[in-house]
């Protein structure tokens, strides 16, 4: 009954969407146009390029979106997306990182796409260039507008890809998939959100303090805190080298204010960045406080990244910091071991990283609303976290009224945690649920006679995942 109701509601939404073509859903036949022609027949869809992808068709596309979904007549912009086409009779996974599309790049599959052996649509988040309205009205960058972008893309492509759809993403992409489900709960048949932080009350961040007080071993925590402090003790020599590097690379500090402020932010990031990207085994590489200034400089650069808080490092992520300072929230961690060495306390906030000509107003109840919805209404949602990832200190928690929803944690996992890293039992359960939600679970799996496994074989080019260290503290 629930499946039938969801199908009916999806059909109503499909029929009622403004500006979408009326092509009927269903699998293509030999008499129908090529898949590229069918995609480009969708009003507002245009081709940037088609790229080779073994076993797939791979399209890089633009789709015309309203700047303001509440007032579609007030202008449009072009939003980039990619489509990894396998077959119209396969399920489709809607992926977003919550940031830019990684273009140019080799076509890749998210983990759910491999599990269900399906198609994949990947969307560039609004206001990340080049998917930014011109001129940019930053008040139109919010989670409802972005969810409405996804809804229109889904509704347009559902006319071709009529089988089940799943939403997924990691980190800010996992947040995005969750927000999409909150505002358009009947679009997707399932949601897989990886390492998605849930900062319900922005000013209450004690969960992060508890995380850093217990993560790994006392020895590792002590080493990290000590080298973080030592970097500040040697501030003058390191900042001098930092300025020389910035000058040689044409890097500037207008947004944050100075190289010294940028340096302090980079050092503040150190312990968080270590646990976001590293593992317990990497504790052995933390330098001693007796190491040379060059060694300490290089280590801080490798873990936090001195390029992070230059104008050139911040600019690509202005949309993220804008959202963090208006709706998403951002973590604040107590650092008593550093307090006597800090010069710019109170500036370690998103407002410091967004140009002053962009106004920002905090919306206090946005995350409370999403958290309440997940707690009370989550249905067919899976949240995956890493045990040693600080971003998971404030997770999403489907409540007792949530239906067919799960939260699993990868032992020792960092910000790259996924289903494959879950412990035995949970991995198979999560895989089975994803297959079921996509409508492709083998009968033997549904009957409990076979272990759930990805339907597509591993492909080193398509599926290889390396957690790329970013020189910024962001999800």
Image (cartoon, rainbow, N blue to C red):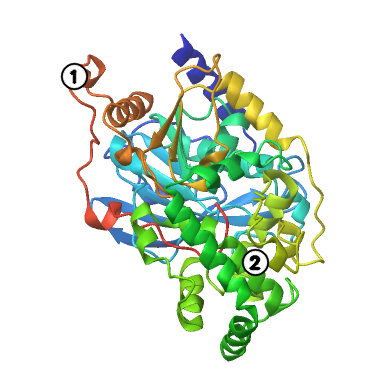
Q: Is residue 156 above or below residue 122?
A: above
Q: Earlier in the sequence, mark 1 or mark 2?
A: 2
Task: Choose between 129 and 396: the one closer to the eye.
Answer: 396
Checking the image for residue 256, the label placed there is none
Q: Is residue 458 visible?
A: yes
Q: Residue at 23% of width from left, 55% of height from top? A: 460
The spot of residue 399 in percent (x, y) is: 56, 19
Q: In the image, is 62 to the left or to the right of 104?
A: right
The spot of residue 278 in percent (x, y) is: 41, 57
Checking the image for residue 444, the label placed there is 1
| Image quarter of residue 38 | top left
Q: Residue at 73% of width from left, 78% of height from top? A: 258
> Dot 1: within a 10 Å radius of its alpha carbon, few (fewer than 14), some, or many (20 or more) residues?
few
Q: Is residue 453 above or below residue 265?
A: above
Q: Nearer the viewer, mark 1 or mark 2?
A: 2
The spot of residue 199 in percent (x, y) is: 64, 40
Q: Is residue 119 above or below residue 382?
A: below
Q: Secondary structure at mark 2?
A: helix
Task: Choose between 112 and 60: the one closer to the eye.
Answer: 112
The spot of residue 77 in percent (x, y) is: 65, 56
Q: Are marks 1 and 2 in contact (CB under 8 Å)?
A: no
Q: Secondary structure at mark 1?
A: helix
Q: Residue at 33% of width from left, 54% of height from top? A: 465
Q: Residue at 22% of width from left, 21% of height from top? A: 445
Checking the image for residue 265, the label placed there is 2
How many angstroms separate mark 1 from mark 2 (CA)? 53 Å
Q: Is residue 316 visible?
A: no
Q: In the image, is 462 to the left or to the right of 375?
A: left
């Amino acid at each position: 009954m629930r499946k039938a109701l969801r199908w009916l509601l999806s059909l109503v939404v499909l029929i009622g969407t403004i500006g979408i073509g009326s092509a009927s859903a269903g699998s293509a036949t030999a008499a129908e146009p090529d898949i590229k022609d069918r995609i480009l027949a969708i009003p507002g869809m245009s081709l940037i390029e088609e790229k080779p992808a073994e076993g797939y068709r791979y399209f890089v596309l633009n789709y015309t979106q309203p700047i303001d979904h509440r007032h579609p007549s007030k202008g449009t912009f072009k939003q980039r997306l990619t489509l990894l086409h396998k077959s119209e009779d396969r399920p489709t996974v809607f992926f977003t990182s919550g940031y830019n599309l990684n273009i140019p790049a080799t076509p890749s599959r998210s983990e759910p796409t491999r599990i269900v052996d399906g198609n994949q649509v990947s969307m560039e988040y609004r206001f990340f260039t080049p998917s930014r309205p011109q001129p940019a009205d930053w008040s139109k960058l919010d989670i409802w507008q972005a969810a409405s972008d996804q809804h229109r893309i889904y509704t347009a492509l559902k006319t071709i890809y009529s089988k089940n759809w799943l939403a997924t993403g990691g980190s800010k992409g996992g947040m995005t998939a969750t927000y999409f489900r909150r505002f358009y709960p009947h679009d997707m048949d399932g949601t897989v959100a990886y390492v998605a932080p849930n900062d319900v009350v922005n000013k209450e961040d004690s969960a992060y303090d508890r995380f850093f007080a217990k993560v790994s071993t006392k020895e590792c925590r002590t080493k990290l805190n000590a080298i973080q402090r030592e970097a500040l003790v040697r501030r003058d020599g390191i900042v001098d080298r930092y300025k020389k590097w910035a000058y040689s690379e044409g890097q500037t500090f207008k947004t944050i204010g100075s190289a010294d402020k940028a340096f302090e932010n980079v050092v503040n990031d150190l312990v968080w960045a270590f646990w976001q990207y590293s593992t317990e085994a990497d504790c052995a590489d933390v330098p001693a406080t007796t190491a040379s200034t060059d060694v300490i400089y290089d280590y801080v650069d490798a873990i936090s990244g001195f390029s992070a808080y230059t104008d050139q490092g911040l600019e690509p992520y202005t949309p993220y910091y804008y959202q963090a300072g208006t709706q998403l929230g951002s973590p604040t961690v107590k650092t008593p071991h550093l307090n006597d060495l800090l010069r710019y306390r109170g500036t370690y906030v998103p407002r410091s990283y967004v140009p002053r000509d962009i106004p920002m107003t905090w919306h206090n109840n946005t995350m409370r609303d999403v958290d309440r919805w997940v707690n009370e209404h989550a249905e067919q949602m899976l949240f995956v976290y890493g045990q040693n990832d600080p971003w998971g200190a404030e997770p999403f928690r489907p409540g007792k009224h949530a239906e067919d929803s799960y939260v699993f944690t990868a032992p020792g996992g960092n910000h790259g945690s996924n289903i494959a890293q879950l412990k035995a039992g949970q991995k198979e359960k999560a895989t089975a649920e994803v297959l079921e939600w996509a409508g492709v679970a083998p009968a033997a799996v549904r009957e409990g006679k076979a272990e759930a496994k990805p339907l597509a074989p591993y492909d080193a080019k398509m599926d290889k995942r390396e957690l790329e260290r970013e020189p910024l503290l962001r999800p």
